[in-house]
Image (cartoon, helix red, strand yellow):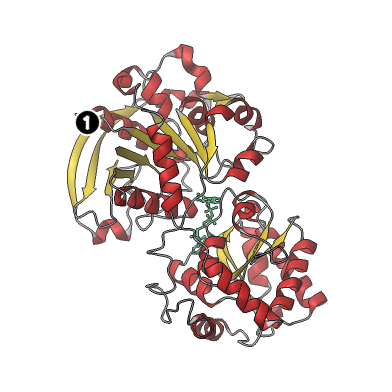
């Protein structure tokens, strides 16, 4: 089968979060089991672009509204990522350093999608399925079916995977002129509420819709930033497929970002060395359990609770633990976390920013990972941490619910709590400290977690079965 993934992110080309990880891994494993998987994404000005060699495979000319432009599709020469990687170059719109956060993001991602559809229309043999990820590629199913120019693509099945339904890419109706001319009778397929909603449009127009865990799909029917009724209405075409993790990149035995590799047999010693490196770098106390948080500092991840959790843990449980935070996001949360460093007695530090290498070292060196998320479609961090023998503390929601079993249950290994509140998280921190002081139980949980299988194997088969059902 020939599968074309369309995404705004793909690790290691450009990554802002979990979307990049998934799009960098799923096609590789699809390719491994004999399919032809390709990824197309915008050509941002990244290190990966500069460090690799490219062939020009297509040149085209198109427009968004009255802005007409040339575009180029380039392909990485050697399949270094294990699948065909294609980048769309549009000068003036996509040639930026960052992925998101520009005032003209609507124009940028609309232009990207128009180019992708225009390019597919030029293929002699069409792909078996076009698999779009999140709202940045959400207008593609509509364009393939209802834009006159691309009528010949209407019969190609499309799959939408929702990694995060909070962001929907809302556009005003004035911006509808950015789309290629379409059948006006079908404008309802673009609309949700009073605006154009690319995510809602993809849910309506894609042949199948998947979410990155089963529990998240259930939650979306009750809480999806305004799309609840749509998820209920379209439930017949929706299913949940849990993400896997890229076990080549996330492997404590061969992680290129850490100095001290380790396996299940050497976990105590290996983690201790990594912890020592972290503690030395951040001035923390090696003898106390180390709790880390890695992620976007936003409400969805309940990052706003962290200052309260750290303060209350020190106050009520005592200064028996260390905290280390890595992330960037809402300025007030960043400021609060930075502002707390003076309270540190060698037991708190933070790194505000994005740092891939440090994240690997933290999964390897920490004892516990905090994930109090209010919303967590799947969550990769908890799976990485378990593979690295770091016990996750998670809220009972979305993919966290589907992947972490509380230590009190038979064969449990993590710490699960119900509410995204300072009190509930502190209680889990206290339970973790108790677990840490019982060396036997702690090692047993670690061993159990490290043997869990979070590889892509079964999820890849589920995606393939879904594609087959569309033919
Ligand atoms: N400051 C920083 N420095 C270095 N690395 C950082 C970082 N901040 C985040 N990361 C990394 O980004 C990734 C985050 O992945 P998640 O899946 O946990 O969340 P995200 O919300 O981005 O993804 C969305 O999509 C994914 C994929 O489907 C879902 O699992 C998830 O639930 C959903 O919210 C991890 O690889 C993490 O290590």
Direction from residue 145 to residue 75 in the image, left or right = left
Q: Residue furthest top?
A: 185
Q: Residue at x 56, y 73 (%)?
A: 447
Give residue 444's quadrant in the image.
Answer: bottom right
Direction from residue 106 to residue 94 in the image, left or right = left
Number of residues whose C-alpha sits closer than 10 Å to that of mark 1, classed few (under 14), some (14–19) or many (20 or more)? few
Location of residue 181 with respect to 320 vertically, above or below: above
Q: Which residue in the protein does label 1 denote? A: 123
**Quarter of the figure that contains the N terminus:** top left
Q: Is residue 217 visible?
A: yes
Direction from residue 430 to residue 247 in the image, left or right = left
Location of residue 420 with respect to 63 vertically, above or below: below
Q: Residue furthest front?
A: 410
Q: Is residue 107 visible?
A: no
**Quarter of the figure that contains the C terminus:** top left
Q: Residue at x 26, y 27 (%)?
A: 121
Direction from residue 257 to residue 234 in the image, left or right = right
Q: Residue at x 51, y 64 (%)?
A: 384
Identify the element where label 1 is drawn.
loop
Residue 461, percent across and down? 41, 45
Residue 355, percent across and down? 46, 67
Q: Residue at x 45, y 48 (%)?
A: 459
Residue 209, percent across and down? 50, 34
Give residue 87's quadrant in the image.
Answer: top left
Residue 297, percent across and down? 60, 59
């Amino acid at each position: 089968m020939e599968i074309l993934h369309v995404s705004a992110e793909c690790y290691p080309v450009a990554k802002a979060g979990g979307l990049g990880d998934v799009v960098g891994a799923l096609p590789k494993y699809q390719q491994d089991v004999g399919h032809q998987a390709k990824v197309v994404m915008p050509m941002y000005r990244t290190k990966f672009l500069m460090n690799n060699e490219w062939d020009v495979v297509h040149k085209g000319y198109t427009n968004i509204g009255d802005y007409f432009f040339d575009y180029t599709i380039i392909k990485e020469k050697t399949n270094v990522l294990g699948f065909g990687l294609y980048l769309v170059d549009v000068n003036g719109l996509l040639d930026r350093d960052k992925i998101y956060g520009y005032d003209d993001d609507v124009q940028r991602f609309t232009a990207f999608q128009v180019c992708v559809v225009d390019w597919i229309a030029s293929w002699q043999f069409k792909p078996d399925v076009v698999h779009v990820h999140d709202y940045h590629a959400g207008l593609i199913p509509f364009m393939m079916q209802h834009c006159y120019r691309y009528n010949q693509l209407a019969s190609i099945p499309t799959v939408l995977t929702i990694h995060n339904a909070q962001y929907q890419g809302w556009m005003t109706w004035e911006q509808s002129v950015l789309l290629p001319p379409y059948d006006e009778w079908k404008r309802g397929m673009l609309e949700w509420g009073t605006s154009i909603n690319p995510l809602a449009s993809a849910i309506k127009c894609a042949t199948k819709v998947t979410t990155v865990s089963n529990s998240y799909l259930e939650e979306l029917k009750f809480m999806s930033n305004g799309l609840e009724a749509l998820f209920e209405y379209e439930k017949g075409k929706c299913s949940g497929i849990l993400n896997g993790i890229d076990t080549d990149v996330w492997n404590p035995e061969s992680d290129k970002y850490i100095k001290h590799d380790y396996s299940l047999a050497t976990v105590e010693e290996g983690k201790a060395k990594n912890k020592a490196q972290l503690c030395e770098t951040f001035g923390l106390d090696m003898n106390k359990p180390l709790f880390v948080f890695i992620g976007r500092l936003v409400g969805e991840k309940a990052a706003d609770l962290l200052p309260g959790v750290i303060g209350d843990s020190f106050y009520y449980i005592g200064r028996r633990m260390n905290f280390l935070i890595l992330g960037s996001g809402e300025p007030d949360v960043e400021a609060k976390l930075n502002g707390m460093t003076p309270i540190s007695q060698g037991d708190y530090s933070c790194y505000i920013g994005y740092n891939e290498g440090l994240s690997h070292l933290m999964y390897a060196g920490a004892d516990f990972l905090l994930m109090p998320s209010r919303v967590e479609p799947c969550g990769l961090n908890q799976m990485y941490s378990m593979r690295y023998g770091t016990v996750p503390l998670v809220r009972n929601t979305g993919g966290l619910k589907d992947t972490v079993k509380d230590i009190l249950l038979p064969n449990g290994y993590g710490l699960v709590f119900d509410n995204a509140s300072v009190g509930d998280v502190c209680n889990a921190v206290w339970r973790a400290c108790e677990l840490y002081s019982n060396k036997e139980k702690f090692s047993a949980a670690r061993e159990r977690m490290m043997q869990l299988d979070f590889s892509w194997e079964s999820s890849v088969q589920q995606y393939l079965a879904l594609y087959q059902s569309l033919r």
